Amino acid sequence: MANHVDDYIEEIKEKEESVPNVKGLLIINTQRDRKPDERDPVGQDQIKLAERENVLIITTVELLDLYERFKLGEINCDPVIKAFSELRGLFSNQDIS
């Protein structure tokens, strides 16, 4: 799951000789052949792995709902940026007030 993150960290370490603080964000569109309300939830094993690897998983449905809330003026960028940088595991729109 975190291969791209690890590759990026190694690339930065080679250039700057320091270890960057990097956060992984994985946007997934699972079971896209099924209606969103008929899709199975993200598996607990994947969520645990994301938590362990400091990665935040966000489904496209949650991302689109988040974007809609932003466009309607219900939220601004600050809580979204904070959530994306601090949370790990599986993102839920309930994480942002």
Image (spheres, rainbow, N blue to C red):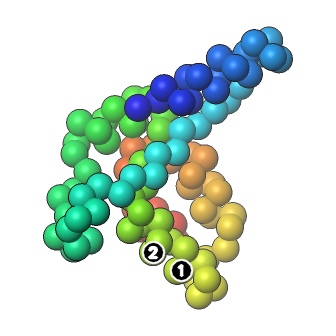
Indicate the position of residue 52 as horizontal and vertical percent values. 40, 29
Indicate the position of residue 56 as horizontal and vertical percent values. 46, 45
Indicate the position of residue 1 as horizontal and vertical percent values. 41, 32
- Residue 91: numbered disc: none
Considering only vertical position in the picture, is 55 above or below 68?
A: above
Residues at marks 2 and 1 touching, judged by CB atoms closer than 8 Å: yes
Q: Nearer the viewer, residue 14 or 50?
A: 14
Q: Nearer the viewer, residue 1 or 78?
A: 1
- Residue 69: numbered disc: 1
Quadrant for residue 72, please give it: bottom right
Question: What residue do we see at 65% from left, 57% from top?
Answer: 81
Looking at the image, the residue that sits furthest to the right is: 16
Question: What residue do we see at 54% from left, 38% from top?
Answer: 24
Secondary-structure class at tag 2: helix
The amino acid type of the residue labelled 1 equals: Arg
Image position of 31 (left or right of 17): left
Image position of 47 (left or right of 17): left
Tell me the residue that label 2 is attached to.
65
